[in-house]
Amino acid sequence: MSKNALQPPRGTRDFYPEDFRRREWLFDHFRRIAHRFAFEEVDAPMVEHAELFTRKAGEEIVDQLYHFEIHDRHLALRPEMTPSVARMVIARAGSLRMPARWFTISQNWRYERMTRGRKREHFQWNMDIWGEPEVTAEAELVGSIFALLDALGLARGDVKVRVNSRALLEESLRQGVLADRPEIFEPLCIVIDKIAKVGPDTVIGQLVDPAGGVGLDEASAREVVGMLSARSLDEAAGYVSPDSPALADLRRFFDLLDAYGVRDQVVFDASVVRGLAYYTGIVFEAFDSGATLRSICGGGRYDGLSEKLGGKPLPAVGFGFGDVVIAEFLADKELWPELPRPLDDMVFALGEAERPAAVAIASRLRSQDRRVELVLGSPKLKRAMTDANRAGAARIWLVGPDEVQRGVAKVRDLASGEEHEEPLDA
Ligand code: HAM
């Protein structure tokens, strides 16, 4: 076998016990916050029909698809959860209680160029609300993001959420570049999403490139890019009519954030459009305020997806929160807690003759739901003590010939060092 085959494929991870403990700690927080907001967990297969993901707006995510043919079927590992959730909602749209609040914790696959915080598989916590057209849903979601960040121990001010509205952008372009060609809006969003990474000149070049799917003239491309520099709602308001519905939505959204106590952590930024084609309304991304990492999470409203996938029109809004970026950020902030091996009791038989008594004690403790290691083999007691201490166990049970004869076990409290005896048949 080649050396290569003994490594996980580049960009993927093995989870050793200590890694898995961290992963579970984070996922527990995801679940806890989702439950606090009355979201229900759902799941779907990691492999879907490739067609579910192959949209044609020029999104990176489509080129990054892990896909394969098997028995004449074209399948793909999911690069994101949203199309699968949409598929599930569509199948039951007639009977679901709306708004449906669903969350998932899923592993996603994208053949990415790797940088810090970007891998070829990652887990995402998704929170989506289906069937609610008003921005009360967006506000609830942003509220849940900050509830999570608080629970992880991050300080207010560590993370900023940047918000824009595709509906606002669409309104401001409707009389102009979109007047005769509304279909270029999606590819246009995909191109301008890259502005922070590639700069305005490259974006203008791509917007005017006739092969690029947008094909603006240079003056229009410059105008579009100019709009992206707005950093306040009042500035952005200049591009739309005073009675713009998108503007009213944004204002209401910001007012609601006040009630959630997170208004100061959220800023308007016209350059945020997101790199996925299906968004139609408010979009948002969270970043560490030092801006050293890629986005911690991102989402928005995607009212058109249900119809695009063949369902009935259904409003939807949600976000995806990755495990990789937040892990880096928690490490930078030294916020990962000590997560020792889960152990409450260790049971140690001094010799093989005492093993049956030790097994009986371990069984009794396990039936009380305690986490018990019955020491196997015949290591030195000192080594067992060190192991138990390292794991933060509460007690070690010692069963020697003398104890068995007297019908007891010796119990040492590892924190205090105190010992007492417990009857074997208790
Ligand atoms: P996304 O922006 O592609 O959105 O991903 C959401 C989050 O997943 C990112 O902010 C990042 O934390 C994490 N992420 C994405 N790609 C990678 C990667 N290659 N390596 C590590 N982490 C990554 C979506 O996927 C949408 N489906 C979210 C959504 C749900 N919108 C509505 N509902």
Image (spheres, rainbow, N blue to C red):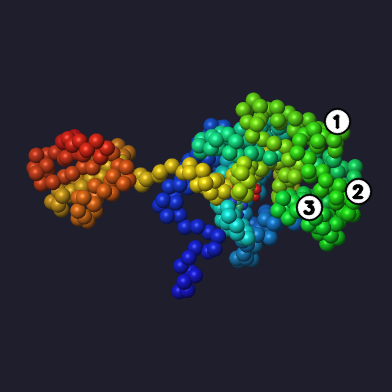
Residue beneath the point at 65% across and 31% down: 264
Answer left or right for 238 relative to 351. right
Indicate the position of residue 356 as horizontal and vertical percent values: 17, 48
User: Which residue type does callout 2 highlight?
Assistant: Asp
Q: Which residue is mark 1?
A: 242
Q: Is residue 155 above or below residue 353?
A: above
Q: Earlier in the sequence, mark 1 or mark 3?
A: 3
Residue mark closest to the camera, 1 vs 2? 1
Residue beneath the point at 43% across and 42% down: 337
Residue 169 sits in quarter: top right
Q: Which mark is residue 373?
A: none
Answer left or right for 198 relative to 147. right
- Looking at the rendered image, the quarter that the N terminus falls into is bottom left
Residue beneath the point at 58% across and 34% down: 156
Q: Which residue is mark 3?
A: 200
Indicate the position of residue 97 as horizontal and vertical percent values: 63, 33
Answer left or right for 37 relative to 402. right
List the single residue furthest toward the bottom: 1
User: Which residue type does callout 1 highlight?
Assistant: Pro
- Looking at the rendered image, the quarter that the C terminus falls into is top left
User: Which residue type does callout 3 highlight?
Assistant: Pro
Q: Which mark is residue 180?
A: 2
